[in-house]
Structures are given as structure tokens and as C-alpha cells.
Amino acid sequence: GRAPSLNGVYSGKVLLADGSIITADDAYIRESILQPKAKIVAGYQPVMPTFQGLVTEEQIMNLTAYIKSLQAQPVPAKGAGIAPVTSGKK
């Protein structure tokens, strides 16, 4: 994808393009929203625009809380899941 997954990222280790490793904490998420080019995740281009001046402090806190709520979920195998609904006609 064009951006790293946020699923399970909070409090995890993140490898940056400069080779350093950081912990995805509140400060990192805040900085990534306001200054997304400050710390680029390895393997990704710095394409996210800044939201500096566009979001309120409350919105940043809400976004951070949402990211915290995302837990690492296994990706289902292709084709797994609920069977498609059919009309019953053959």
C-alpha cells in the first residue's frame, strides 16, 4: 500500500527510513499528524500532507485514541469469511 498499516502500530517498534527504530507512542502519532515528513517509515514515500493548523488538539487526541484502539488482527486468508448470499435459484 501507499502507507503503513495503523493496525496494531501503537506502542510497537517502527523502523524509520534513516535506520533508527522508535516506539509509536502519543508523541510520535502527534508528530506524524502535524509534521508527517519528520519521521518516515522505512519502505514508504513521504506523501502524507501535514494537518498542522487543520485539526484541533481534541481531534488529534481522538485520532490518537482511535489508533490506540486498533489491535493487531490476523489478515483473513483470501476467500475466507462468510459465504456469499445466493438467491436460492438454480
Image (spheres, rainbow, N blue to C red):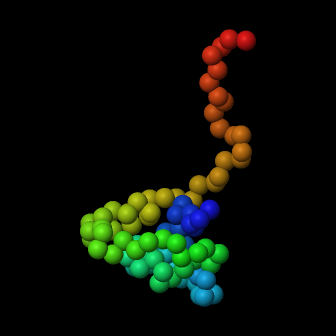
Which quadrant: the C terminus? top right
* Vertical position of residue 60 compared to residue 37: above or below: above
Query: Who's the residue at 44% across and 72% down the image?
Result: 49
Horizontally, residue 69 falls left or right of residue 7, namely left
Residue nearest the observer in this picture, 66 or 50: 50
Query: Who's the residue at 51% across and 82% down the image?
Result: 39
Query: Who's the residue at 60% across and 88% down the image?
Result: 18
| Residue 81 shows in this picture | yes
**Which quadrant would residue 32 be assigned to in this image?**
bottom left
Query: Who's the residue at 54% across and 76% down the image?
Result: 46
Q: Position of residue 60 (x, y in %)?
A: 33, 68
Q: Position of residue 42 (x, y in %)?
A: 62, 78
* Vertical position of residue 81 compared to residue 88: above or below: below
* Vertical position of residue 69 compared to residue 83: above or below: below
| Residue 29 shows in this picture | no
**Which quadrant would residue 59 be assigned to in this image?**
bottom left
Horizontally, residue 7 falls left or right of residue 30, namely right
* Vertical position of residue 26 compared to residue 78: above or below: below
**Which quadrant would residue 53 be assigned to in this image?**
bottom left
Residue nearest the observer in this picture, 12 or 29: 29
Q: Position of residue 27 (x, y in %)?
A: 40, 79
Residue nearest the observer in this picture, 8 or 47: 47
